[in-house]
Image (cartoon, rainbow, N blue to C red):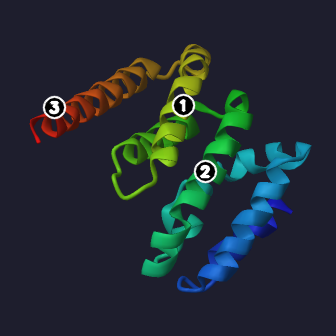
């Protein structure tokens, strides 16, 4: 079922937003079951935005919040099963979403929470796989520092007005 959902996302025409939305909702329903672990081998493809969202402008603009929240829920639930490479992809995407002003604040906040929830998994995977999780953790810290700096700058601009 999981690979079929991903296959349908892959072959779905890029501009057909309503079909992509239904496929993302179907994936969300699968996440509510124990079948969510079946997505783990498919994670690399799920992090590919061309597969997840398509290349169409409409799907990209309208489905990003749903797609990112679905993917974040999946990563949160299966984070203990993910290899360091997939954790790195999750950090990359979440870091980008934290600073994307075109996304709703709720998605930015969810991305921050996901980053914090990944810290221990990255440390464990780094030790187990011999990878360099330290670089990922430093990158995550930089993301938060930059976000705080941006928000403080906005607050001071509002005070001046």
Looking at the image, which residue is at 38% across and 46% down?
96
Answer with the quarter of the image where residue 159 lies.
top left
Q: Which residue is mark 2?
A: 69
Q: Callout 1: few (<14), some (14-19), or many (20+) C-alpha neighbours within 10 Å? A: some
Whether tag 1 and tag 2 are in contact, CB under 8 A, the answer is no
Quadrant of the drawing holding the N terminus: bottom right
Q: Which residue is mark 1?
A: 113
Query: The residue tagged with tag 3: helix, strand or loop?
Result: helix
Q: Is residue 3 above or below residue 86?
A: below
Q: Label 1, label 3: how many angstroms apart (C-alpha)?
A: 25 Å
Is tag 1's residue or tag 3's residue first in the polypeptide sequence? 1
Q: Label 3, label 2: how many angstroms apart (C-alpha)?
A: 30 Å
Q: Is residue 56 visible?
A: no
Q: Which mark is residue 156?
A: 3
Query: The residue tagged with tag 2: helix, strand or loop?
Result: helix
Looking at the image, which residue is at 79% across and 65% down?
26
Q: Is residue 92 above or below residue 1?
A: above
């Amino acid at each position: 079922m999981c690979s079929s959902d991903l296959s349908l996302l892959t072959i779905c025409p890029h501009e057909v937003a309503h079909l992509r939305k239904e496929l993302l909702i179907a994936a969300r329903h699968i996440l509510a079951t124990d079948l969510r672990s079946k997505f783990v081998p498919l994670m690399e493809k799920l992090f590919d935005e061309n597969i997840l969202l398509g290349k169409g402008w409409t799907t990209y603009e309208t489905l990003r919040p749903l797609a990112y929240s679905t993917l974040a829920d999946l990563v949160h639930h299966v984070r203990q099963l993910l290899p360091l490479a997939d954790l790195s992809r999750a950090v990359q995407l979440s870091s980008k979403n934290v600073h994307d002003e075109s996304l709703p604040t709720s998605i930015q906040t969810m991305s921050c929470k996901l980053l914090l929830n990944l810290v221990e998994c990255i440390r464990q995977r780094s030790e187990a796989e011999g990878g360099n999780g330290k670089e990922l953790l430093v990158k995550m810290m930089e993301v938060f520092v930059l976000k705080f700096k941006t928000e403080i700058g906005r607050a001071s601009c509002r005070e001046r007005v």
